Amino acid sequence: MNYVNVLLKALNFPTLLMRDEWSLSYQYVSGMKKWLGGIVPYDLLNRTVKQAVDSLVTLCQCQDFYEKFPDKINTPDYGDNWGVRANYIEINNRAIAEMVCNTTRNGILSSIKLLPAIPPSAKSWANCVILSQIFPNIYGDGYNKPVGEENSLYGIKLNSGYSFNIIDFDIADKISPEGQFRAFNQLANFHGVKTGFRTVISADQIKVVQKDKSDVTFDWQNPEHVELFIKEHVKLIKMGFEAIFIDSAKHIGGYDMDNYTGVGELPDYSQMQYILHEIRVRSGNTHLSFVGEKSTGDFKRYENLGLTSGTAYIEPDNYDEVKQHSMNLKYEMSYTPGIEVSNDNDEGGRSYEARLNRINNALFAYEYPSDKLPSFMQMEDLFPLRYDTSTHALMMTNPSYSDDGSPQSHWINLFACDDGCEYNKKVSELFVHAQNL
C-alpha cells in the first residue's frame, strides 16, 4: 500500500509531486547520490511534509522524476548481513517534534522532514536511521518540561500503542499510527537509507499497561510479559523497520554487572537468544540487524546471542588503530564491533574538529571498502546542538527552547546556527567522498 499518498491526503495535501527548486540549491551530489547539506534543521523542520516529499523525489537517484510517489518501494539491498558494515545515525525524534506551548507532538512528521538531509547509503554499505522513541515514555509523554526536569526516554510503556510525542493523532482516523510509521519507512527507503529504532531491556524501565488496571513493572520471569515484548517488536519490524538498537545489551545474562547503569533485571542469555530468534522468525525478515550497546570484547558471546554489531570497542580518534581493527576483522561477516562518533550518553563538549575526525575515521579507515567497520552517530554529529544542551540531556529531559511557544522558535533555538551550518557542510563533504567507494 502507498502510505505516503495516504499521509499526504490525511494532511490535506495533493499527491501530485513537484520539483523542489529550493532543494536543488542545497543539494550535495556524489555520483547518483543526492542529499541536502550546508543547512540547519530549522531549514527543513519549518517546511511542510508535502515539501519534504517533493524534496526527496527531487533528490532521487533515479533518472525520471516521479509525479506520483511510487507504489512499490524496496529497501536498499546490501544482503542479509548489511548490519555488520552499516553507519547507524540515531535521530532523537522527540527533540525535533512540534513543541506547542507545553505539548510535544508529531515527531514522526519532523523525522520525515529531516530525511532529505541524511546522506543516502553508499555503494558498499548502508546508512541506517535509528529513531530514539517509538513507545510512550513512562512520565510526561506528550508534554515537554522545563530544562533539568527529568522526562526520560529510557523508561517506556508496552501494550499502550505509540508515543503522543511521535504520532500525529489529529489524523489518526485517516492514517493510523502504524500507517504513519510505514510512510516514514517508505520515504526513507526511497531516499536510500534503512531504518530502525531504540529499545530498552532493563525491567524496571518498562511498564506494562493493563486494561482497567494499574500499570505493572515488566518481569522477565513472566512468560506473558516476554511474549508481549516479542509481539510489540515484531509489529514494528512488519511496519518496515530493519534494525533494533538494544540499550544495555552488554549486560544480558548478568555480564559485567559492575558497570551496569540501568535499573532492574535483564533477560538471561538463552532467553535473549530466544527473543531475537523469534523476532526474526515471526517477522519473516531474514536481514534484521540487532545492535548491542557496549556489546564488545567477547565477540563470540554477542555473535552467538544473535547480535549483528556492537558499540564502543574501538578507539575512534586514531585512524591507524581503526584501520588495523578493520583489517583484523575483515572476514567477520556475522558480527563486528564498531566505532562511535558519539553515543546517547554524550554529554557534549567535544570540538567540531574532533567530531569530524571521528566521522572521517568511520568512513575511510580501512584497506578496502568491503572491510569497513560499522559506525554509530547521533543527530548532533550531523547537526550540532545549542551550546548548553547535549545528546544525553535530550534523552533524559524534554525541554522546549521556544521563546514564544511556537515549534518554529524551538527548532531554531535547539541547534547551533551559523557555525552549525558550516559544520554540516564539512560533514556533507566527507560523505561526498565516501558514497561511491
Image (tube, helix red, strand yellow):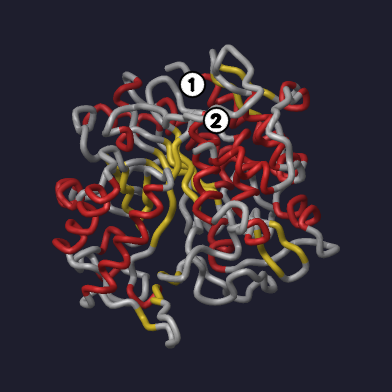
Residue pictured at 74% horizontal, 52% vertical:
411
Q: Position of residue 364 (x, y in %)?
A: 42, 25
| Mark 1 nearby-residue class (10 Å; few <14, some 14–19, many ≥20) | many
Mark closer to the chain start, 2 or 1? 2
Which is nearer the eye, 315 or 233? 233
Relative to the observer, which residue lies in front, 283 or 338? 283
Q: Is residue 231 above or below residue 305?
A: below
The percent coordinates of residue 295 (x first, y second) are 28, 53
The amino acid type found where label 2 is placed reads: Pro
**Horizontal arrangement in the rendering, residue 340 relative to residue 9 (left or right):** left
Residue 172: tell me if it is visible: yes
How many numbered dots are placed on residues in this image?
2
Q: Pick out the residue farthest to the bottom.
A: 213
- Circle 1 sits on which residue? 435
Location of residue 353 by image quarter: top right
Q: CA distance from mark 2 to mark 1?
A: 9 Å
Identified by mark 1, the residue type is: Gln
Which residue, as the protein is rendered here, is positioned at the far right? 404
Q: Could you tell me if residue 420 is visible in this image?
A: no
Of 85 and 101, the residue lying toward us: 101
Which corner quadrant holds the C terminus?
top left
Q: Assess disc 2: are there few (<14), some (14-19) or many (≥20) residues with their C-alpha within 10 Å of its C-alpha.
A: many
**Which residue carries the number 2 mark?**
119
The answer to the question of whether label 2 and label 1 lie on touching residues, with beta carbons closer than 8 A, is yes
Q: Secondary structure at mark 1?
A: loop
Tell me which residue sits at (23%, 65%) in the image.
Answer: 256
Expressed as whole percent of the image width and height from the top left, the position of residue 40 reads: 71, 40
Compared to residue 20, the image places residue 305 above or below, namely below
Residue 18 against residue 95 in the figure, above or below: above
Judge whether 240 appears above or below 225 on screen: above
On the image, which quarter does residue 36 sit in? Answer: top right
